Amino acid sequence: MSRNQAIDSLLNELGPMAPAGYFVGLHIRFAAPLLTFQTYSQAWSDHYTRNAYALRDPMIAWGISRTGATRWSDIDLPDPFGIMKDAARHGLVCGVCVSCGEISSRTVAGLARADREFTDEEIAAISGVVLRLHHVSQPPDTLTKAEIEALHVLASGERYAAGAVVLGISESALKARLSSARKKLFARTSAEAIQRAKDYRLI
């Protein structure tokens, strides 16, 4: 099973645990997650984005500052913008926050339901899935010399054919190196791979 398939499988496992939806930010580094997944309602997602709540959300602040799991109702951080009450009006009445990983690569997840608090057993099961998501999506600490060279030549503005000439390899070999780098960095495009490699100080 590939890493992407493993992530999809774990997200499928997480879905039924969050009747009102979930948000997962995997490996938050330099204020941006490597990957994000969310199933909250479109109305809430749009409202949340429009009001820039990510910068003010007490659940995100709790997850960045601590590890473990807590019910939203137990979060002891100020909420001057009333985000939690606003979430409840959108059907996210009760929730749990799970946070794991080093501060330099933190994973934060929020799961919600409209009817009742999550039980201790449910929180334990959710925490296990989030921890497995964190581990399976671990970004690389290094890239191979060949992958770094391929990203560098593309970042310099060269097209595939010209970049291959610069490196003294075939165009197909260059594309293979870029494909390998994209997979390691969970990037959909080479441009995204270049940016993530820069963000993670890999190039």
Image (cartoon, grey):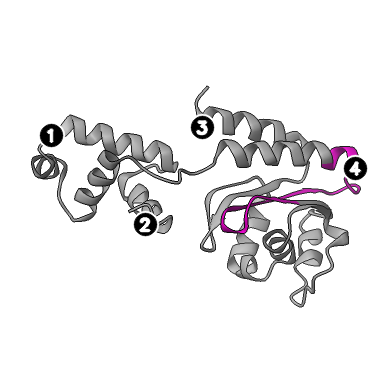
Determine the CA span between mark 1 and mark 3: 29 Å
Question: What amino acid is at disc 1?
Answer: Ile
Q: Estimate how packed mark 3 is, as few (under 14), some (14 to 19) or many (20 or more) residues with alpha carbons within 10 Å.
A: few
Asked if labels 3 and 2 touch by Cβ distance under 8 angstroms, the answer is: no
Q: Estimate how packed mark 2 is, as few (under 14), some (14 to 19) or many (20 or more) residues with alpha carbons within 10 Å.
A: few
Q: Is label 1 or label 4 in front?
A: 1
Residue drawn at (19%, 56%) of the image? 156
Percent across and percent down for residue 154 are 21, 49
Q: What residue sits right under mark 4 in the picture? A: 120
Asked if labels 3 and 1 touch by Cβ distance under 8 angstroms, the answer is: no
* Secondary structure category for the residue under label 4: helix
Question: What amino acid is at disc 2?
Answer: Lys
Count the numbered circles shown. Answer: 4
* Secondary structure category for the residue under label 1: loop
Q: Is residue 39 left or right of residue 73?
A: left
* Secondary structure category for the residue under label 3: helix
Question: What amino acid is at disc 3?
Answer: Asn
Asked if 83 appears above or below 68 in the picture, the reply is: below
Asked if 128 appears above or below 41 in the picture, the reply is: above
Asked if 3 appears above or below 31 in the picture, the reply is: above
Disc number for residue 169: 1
Q: Which residues are magenta?
A: 98-123
Q: Earlier in the sequence, mark 4 or mark 3?
A: 3
Q: Estimate how packed mark 4 is, as few (under 14), some (14 to 19) or many (20 or more) residues with alpha carbons within 10 Å.
A: few
Determine the CA span between mark 1 and mark 4: 56 Å
Determine the CA span between mark 2 and mark 3: 22 Å
Q: Earlier in the sequence, mark 2 or mark 3?
A: 3
Percent across and percent down for residue 119 are 91, 42
Q: What residue sits right under mark 3 in the picture? A: 4
